[in-house]
Image: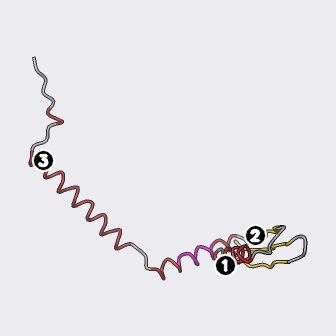
Amino acid sequence: MFVIKWHNVLSKFDSFKKKYIFDFNSRTHEETNAARKLTAEQRRDKKVKRAMEDTANGVHAAVYRVRHLDDPAKRFKVETNCKQLQMTGCVVLCKDVNIIVVEGG
């Protein structure tokens, strides 16, 4: 007695239909994603809005002690991170120890 497994065998029409449906679904998926994509200005506004919502919950302050802040690259990194995270504060530069005080959401 032979057992034939028909559920694994696809006819030419079935394989064409399956490929056509897959292509159609993937194409519509790509089109809807492209329609929903935000412009550069909308993405920027969304980031600013999210940062402002963070500060609505409360403002946190932090104090950091850094031994060496002589390197301009490190100062630039600190300044850039503060700007990106919408933080404010100050840096106290001393000979032995440097202190960074920041506040933000």
Q: Disc number at residue 60?
A: 2
**Could you tell me the amino acid type at mark 1?**
Lys
**Could you tell me the amino acid type at mark 2?**
His
Quadrant of the rendered structure where residue 92 is? bottom right
Q: Is residue 32 above or below residue 14?
A: below
Q: Tally the marks.
A: 3
Q: Disc number at residue 83?
A: 1
* Residue furthest bottom as drawn: 41
Around disc 2, counting alpha carbons within 10 Å, would you say few (fewer than 14), some (14 to 19), or many (20 or more)? few
Residue 63 locus on image (x, y percent): 82, 69
**Could you tell me the amino acid type at mark 3?**
Asp
Q: Is residue 24 above or below residue 1?
A: below
Determine the CA span between mark 1 and mark 3. Answer: 57 Å
Residue under numbered circle 3: 14
Residue 51 falls within the magenta-colored stretch: yes
- Going from N to C along the chain, the mark reached first, 2 or 3, is 3
Q: Which residues are magenta?
A: 45-53
Residue at 77% x, 74% y is 102
Residue 72 locus on image (x, y percent): 73, 78
Residue at 48% x, 80% y is 42
| Figure quadrant of the N terminus | top left
Instruction: Check whether the beta carbons of the residues at disc 2 and disc 3 lie within 8 A of each other.
Output: no
Residue at 16% x, 30% y is 5
Around disc 1, counting alpha carbons within 10 Å, would you say few (fewer than 14), some (14 to 19), or many (20 or more)? few
- Going from N to C along the chain, the mark reached first, 2 or 1, is 2
Q: Secondary structure at mark 1?
A: helix
Residue 54 falls within the magenta-colored stretch: no
Residue 32 horizontal side relative to residue 68, left or right: left
How would you classify the magenta stretch by its main secondary structure? Answer: helix
Residue 33 locus on image (x, y percent): 35, 68
